[in-house]
Image: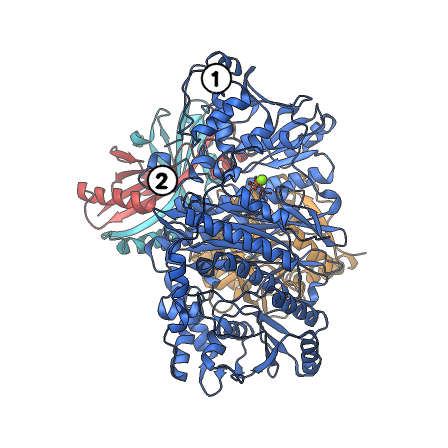
Chain colours: A orange, B cyan, C blue, D red
């Protein structure tokens, strides 16, 4: 038996198939979820993939946040289910207030696609347990609105509580405050980041295979929980 | 039939790269004397009924939960005559805001 | 601001047209010539209705009818080499090529030049949208896009308006659609100042059994319009915007700009592919230029001929549109499907699932006419073939221009050459940092190359390589090329060189070239000199395709790219598709392993006509372009493919504009490794470094493979010259100069950001 | 010190995918009765001098050549009291437009 990891498809989701592939390569079972269904099909964890849900119109993630599937995802996330938001998924999580802060237009105003170095700042989440603290990884980054912002108090609190999960290394690609690339909620089960680990799982198509750890992490976290 | 306008601007403490880019570009284009630029969004909503208090309350709710992300944005709701053509687009005096 | 609007009391019906033969009609305003108007009257046996006139005028425009180019394009079919791989040939929306293992690939290139000059962002964005729908309509899932671009001088203020907008538009649309951008071109030349070229290529993949054609057959089958609502976008655009020189002095002719909605298109893709998968579709057609006029007439014409459409059923964005305008509207993100009655409910349900508006607007009839009704009154009754396929064909006069001889006589060989190592070094650096040769990452960083997770190679590699099957590793490679400077010097050779380069680029990755698409960008066909360039280029391309065994499967013609009397350089852009049985063996361009040996494949002669060196150092264009040797290209490709298959080389990079020095610099930068070069016997350093002789590539050979590799080259008769070794942190040409890699990098990578950042 | 507001909206005949996406989303969020939504941009410019006719002419020029893309957008220029806080964001009556 293997962990069942749901991948939500919103209208305009683009990296959903890639997230499913990454889950499969990590030995878990990908389960497609549809934005109109409240039913999560008994998955153990959920990924909100990258893309341009609803064209990124209004604000990235703003419309997707109100889809039926998100009602259940929000409930389950509060109840402790591992939820990962990648890029657009991160934006949806912020719009849903499952994660603090917001993502704004890149400071240089361009969409940017590049291989990005990151430091893993926290391994105590179901999505990062297979990394070591301080580990440097390189995965693709691709977005137009990836600037992470929050007020100073929130930023201080995130740092103090160890909820900055990833930080950009090298040149800050988008003006994110304090080089923040990803954060988690208080409990640590909900993680969001702008870069795309699902595009770094095969040597042939990614810059590295550094992203695979996300998916092996959740597979083993889920199994550990099921066993205990 | 009424037109309600919702204006959404980034909160003052949030960096506005678009506004800054505009401001930086202005002197190059020969426009001096602009000390700050902020860029925001403007929504024109056509209502199928009158813009009475109940309708405005609904629009405010819409702005609060949906049109603006109040983590980073402020909004303003105001009524415009439905008959407004763009070249008469003076705003009605009634304005309000929430943060 | 909107296109000609002819308001009249009630629609102009067929009945009324028959009864009022003398009503004056605005055929000239709509771009028709008098004899064309007369022919329409002959076909119909009466005057056309307003709606019929609208349809004929857009469909018989240059853009849609290919009236000036048709007689020349025929060669692509007539001279087409036999190819077992061709499943659908020229004449459909896009050709379809068998790539093995039950997979078929369709690809095509189109232009959106004029709209991108008027409104760079939306013009370029809707260019991508249009070509993607073409590919989708063949039944394929679009898997990648490419964007060959040409702009005016890099430092011209208007280029600063056009380029960032075009790039943002291509990225904005393609990224949002979830299609990786895997390659393209960016060329600057003052000749494109008022006429930038925005070409877009899309490639799609399907199983053989999924191939669909645009045909409406089976009386009783329903015609369903789905996608965006119809608005006043680009009305008259097809006939006016694309067919006449854009001229600021005639603002009234500026049609409303088409605005793209990539999100809507993404939904169209998913919903269309589901409909295919469930076998719900008899025929399908995208709506592009000429909108419903084109879709209904082409569908009906390709079927049995009969179709009835109730135009008032078309969902509108602007309720004031007249029937003529609805027929001409170029609103984006719309498709037309022919669906059997028993599948209509399921088709509509799929559209509902994807939030796509879908409306039954008509049905296939057992007649032979396309009949369109407006609230019950018949406003169109035409034989659809006469609209779609039997438009005017012009034998435009053409003549070799008088200046061609002088241009060719102005030999680049007379240009002063660098006399010392120091001069060579300075000119190499100037070349590498010049806008045309500089890194394009400022542009390509704005494109998503990762989405879909199958991109094996993308820019700046010689060709983009996409994995088609995850299990077997089957993949395709694509490259586009075109050198307007070469084509200006000799359009026949220029077109062949464009093909040769794209072919070579595909082979450099280890893929076997299979088929060709082309976008022919030229000036006004009314100028006999331009028409001669066009005739020469098509003849050159058709002849070369025959030799290389790569049929042209489809393409696009863009004429009237000129300002006043000044035409752009003739710019045939050629796309080549190749297949690679296992993408794991693809050959990248990067020099990565210190100690590997560098071999130059092919012959180097003193060829500087149209070269990057002559442009950058001397601002010169004259003489003859490099000699074309297609047999040599074929041999070079075989060697590159075999070397990849047998693991004999670790890197390959084709030599083109900028010559060897440019290619080696790029491969060094890509791999972060320096190189030491030795000028071979019999060559002077300058020719070695800067000549643009065709049919060449540089490869990096592991020492362990050297004997096997050189033996193979010798047996096959391909000259292979050892020219150096991967080594150190500088690019050194022994006895001449040495350039630190970091200096080259700065020169190469800072140019575009400095201009546009 | 004066604040001038430039509002930029797509011309009525131009497709506004953003506005449409918002409108389609509203009923799902429980907001009925909105028949049309158009989304545009709003620029707040702080001038270092008064918003006199000369200054406004300059801003109009700026809007025409830079802030708006007049191929597809219309704009409106109007003055706001510099002291305006967001919650008094009533617009001044003087409004104008160009195409
Ligand atoms: N330069 C060309 N080379 C080969 N085929 C061409 C060329 N230009 C147009 N064609 C072919 O002519 C047909 C009509 O082209 P086109 O009108 O561009 O299709 P669409 O209706 O999709 O715009 C297509 O099959 C196209 O591939
Ligand atoms: Mg077509």
Q: Residue at x 49, y 75 (%)?
A: C661
Q: Residue at x 47, y 71 (%)?
A: C607
Mark 1 closeness class: few <14, some 14–19, many ≥20 residues within 10 Å: many
- Report whether residue A57 is seen: yes
Which chain contains the residue that carries disc 2?
D
- Quadrant of the displayed image that contains ligand 2: top right
- Report whether residue B15 is seen: no
Residue C30 place in picture, x, y as percent: 43, 30
In the image, is residue C680 above or below residue C259?
below
Quadrant where the N terminus of chain C is found in the figure: top left
Q: Is residue C193 left or right of residue C224?
A: left
* In the foreground, D31 or C659: C659
Residue C462 place in picture, x, y as percent: 57, 64
- The residue positioned farthest toward the bottom in the image shown: C735
Q: Are marks 1 and 2 in contact (CB under 8 Å)?
A: no
Q: Is residue C728 left or right of residue C425?
A: right
- Circle 2 is placed at which residue position? D8
* In the foreground, C700 or A25: C700
Among the 4 quarters of the image, the one containing residue C472: bottom right
Among the 4 quarters of the image, the one containing residue C754: bottom left
């Amino acid at each position: 038996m293997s962990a069942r990891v749901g991948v939500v498809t919103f209208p305009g989701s683009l990296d959903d198939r890639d997230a499913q592939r990454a889950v499969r390569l990590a030995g878990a079972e990908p389960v497609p979820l549809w934005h109109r269904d409240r039913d999560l099909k008994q998955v153990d964890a959920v990924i909100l993939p990258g893309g341009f849900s609803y064209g990124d119109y209004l604000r990235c993630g703003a419309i997707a946040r109100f889809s039926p599937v998100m009602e259940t995802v929000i409930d389950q996330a509060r109840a402790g289910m591992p939820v990962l938001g990648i890029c657009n998924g991160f934006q949806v999580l912020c719009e849903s207030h499952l994660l603090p802060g917001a993502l704004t237009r890149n400071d240089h105003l361009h969409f940017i696609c590049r291989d990005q170095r990151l430091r893993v700042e926290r391994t105590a989440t179901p999505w990062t347990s297979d990394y070591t603290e301080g580990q440097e990884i390189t995965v693709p980054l691709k977005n137009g609105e990836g600037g992470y912002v929050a007020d100073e108090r929130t930023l201080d609190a995130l740092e103090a509580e160890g909820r900055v999960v990833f930080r950009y290394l090298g040149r800050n690609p988008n003006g994110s405050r304090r080089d923040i690339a990803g954060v988690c909620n208080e409990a640590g089960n909900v993680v969001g980041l702008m870069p795309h680990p699902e595009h770094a799982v095969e040597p042939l198509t990614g810059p590295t295979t550094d992203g695979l750890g996300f998916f092996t992490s959740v597979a083993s976290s889920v199994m550990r929980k099921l066993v205990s | 039939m009424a037109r309600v306008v919702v204006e959404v601007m980034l909160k003052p403490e949030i960096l506005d790269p678009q506004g800054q880019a505009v401001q930086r570009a202005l002197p190059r284009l020969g426009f001096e004397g602009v000390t700050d630029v902020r860029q925001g969004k403007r929504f024109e909503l056509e209502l199928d009924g009158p813009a009475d208090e109940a309708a405005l309350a609904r629009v405010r709710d819409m702005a609060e939960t949906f049109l603006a992300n109040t983590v980073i944005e402020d909004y303003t709701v105001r009524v415009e005559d439905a008959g407004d053509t763009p070249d008469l687009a003076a705003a009605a005096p009634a304005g309000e805001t929430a943060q | 601001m909107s296109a000609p609007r002819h308001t009249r009391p009630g629609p102009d019906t067929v009945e009324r047209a028959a009864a009022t033969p003398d009503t004056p009609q605005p055929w000239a305003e709509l771009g028709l010539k008098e004899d064309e108007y007369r022919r329409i009257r002959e076909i119909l046996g009466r005057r056309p209705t307003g709606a019929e006139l609208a349809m004929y005028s857009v469909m018989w425009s240059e853009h849609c009818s290919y009236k000036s180019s048709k007689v020349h394009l025929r060669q692509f079919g007539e001279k087409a080499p036999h190819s077992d791989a061709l499943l659908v040939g020229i004449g459909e929306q896009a050709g379809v090529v068998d790539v093995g293992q039950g997979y078929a690939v369709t690809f095509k290139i189109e232009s959106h030049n004029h709209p991108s000059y008027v409104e760079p962002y939306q013009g370029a964005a809707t260019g991508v949208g249009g070509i993607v729908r073409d590919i989708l309509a063949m039944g394929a899932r679009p898997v990648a896009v490419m964007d060959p671009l040409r702009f005016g001088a890099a430092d011209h203020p208007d280029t600063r308006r056009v380029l960032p907008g075009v790039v943002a538009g291509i990225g904005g649309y393609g990224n949002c659609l979830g299609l990786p951008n895997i390659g393209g071109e960016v060329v600057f030349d003052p000749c494109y100042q008022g006429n930038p070229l925005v070409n877009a290529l899309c490639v799609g993949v399907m199983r053989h059994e999924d191939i669909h054609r645009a045909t409406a057959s089976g009386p009783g089958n329903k015609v369903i319009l789905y996608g965006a609502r119809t608005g006043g976008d680009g009305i008259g655009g097809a006939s006016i915007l694309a067919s006449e020189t854009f001229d600021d002095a005639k603002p009234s002719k500026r049609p409303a700009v088409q605005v793209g909605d990539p999100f809507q298109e993404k939904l169209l893709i998913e919903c269309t592919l589901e409909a295919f998968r469930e076998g719900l579709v008899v025929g399908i057609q995208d709506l592009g230029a000429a909108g419903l006029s084109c879709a209904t007439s082409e569908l009906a014409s390709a079927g049995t001929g009969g179709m009835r459409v109730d135009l008032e059923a078309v969902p509108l964005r602007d309720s004031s549109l007249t029937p003529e305008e609805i027929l001409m509207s170029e609103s984006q993100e719309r498709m037309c499907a022919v669906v059997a009655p028993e599948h209509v409910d399921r088709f509509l349900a799929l559209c509902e699932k994807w939030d796509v508006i879908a409306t039954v607007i008509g049905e296939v009839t057992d007649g032979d006419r396309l009949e369109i009704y407006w609230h019950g009154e018949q406003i169109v009754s035409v034989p659809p073939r006469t609209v779609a396929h039997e438009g005017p064909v012009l034998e435009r006069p053409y003549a070799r221009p008088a200046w061609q001889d002088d241009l060719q006589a102005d030999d680049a060989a007379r240009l002063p050459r660098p006399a010392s190592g120091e001069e060579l070094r300075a000119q190499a650096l100037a070349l590498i940092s010049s806008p045309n040769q500089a890194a394009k990452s400022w542009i390509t960083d704005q494109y998503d190359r990762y989405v879909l997770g199958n991109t094996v190679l993308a820019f700046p590699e010689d060709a983009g390589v996409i994995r088609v099957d995850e299990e077997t590793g089957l993949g395709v490679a694509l490259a586009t090329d075109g050198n307007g400077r070469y084509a200006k010097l000799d359009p026949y050779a220029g077109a062949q060189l464009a093909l040769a380069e794209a072919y070579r680029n595909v082979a450099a990755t280890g893929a076997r070239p299979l088929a060709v698409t082309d976008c022919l960008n030229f000036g006004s066909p009314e100028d006999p000199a331009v028409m001669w360039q066009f005739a020469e280029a098509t003849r050159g391309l058709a002849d070369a395709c025959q030799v290389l065994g790569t049929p042209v499967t489809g393409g696009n013609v863009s004429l009237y790219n000129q300002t006043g009397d000044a035409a752009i350089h003739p710019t045939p852009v050629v796309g080549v598709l190749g297949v690679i049985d296992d993408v794991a063996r693809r050959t990248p361009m990067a020099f990565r392993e210190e100690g590997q040996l560098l071999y130059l494949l092919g012959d180097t002669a003193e060829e500087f006509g149209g070269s990057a060196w002559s442009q950058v150092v001397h601002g010169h264009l004259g003489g003859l372009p490099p000699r074309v040797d297609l047999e040599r290209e074929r041999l070079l490709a075989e060697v590159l493919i075999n070397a990849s298959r047998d693991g004999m080389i670790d890197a390959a990079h084709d030599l083109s504009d900028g010559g060897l020095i440019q290619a080696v610099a790029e491969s060094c930068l890509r791999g972060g490794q320096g190189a030491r070069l030795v000028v071979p016997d019999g060559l002077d350093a300058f020719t070695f470094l800067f000549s643009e002789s065709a049919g060449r590539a540089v490869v990096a050979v592991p020492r362990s493979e050297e004997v096997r590799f050189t033996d193979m080259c010798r047996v096959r008769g391909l000259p292979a010259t050892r020219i150096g070794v991967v080594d150190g942190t500088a690019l050194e040409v022994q006895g001449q100069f040495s350039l630190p890699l970091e200096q080259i990098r700065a020169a190469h990578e800072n140019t575009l950001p400095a201009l546009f950042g």
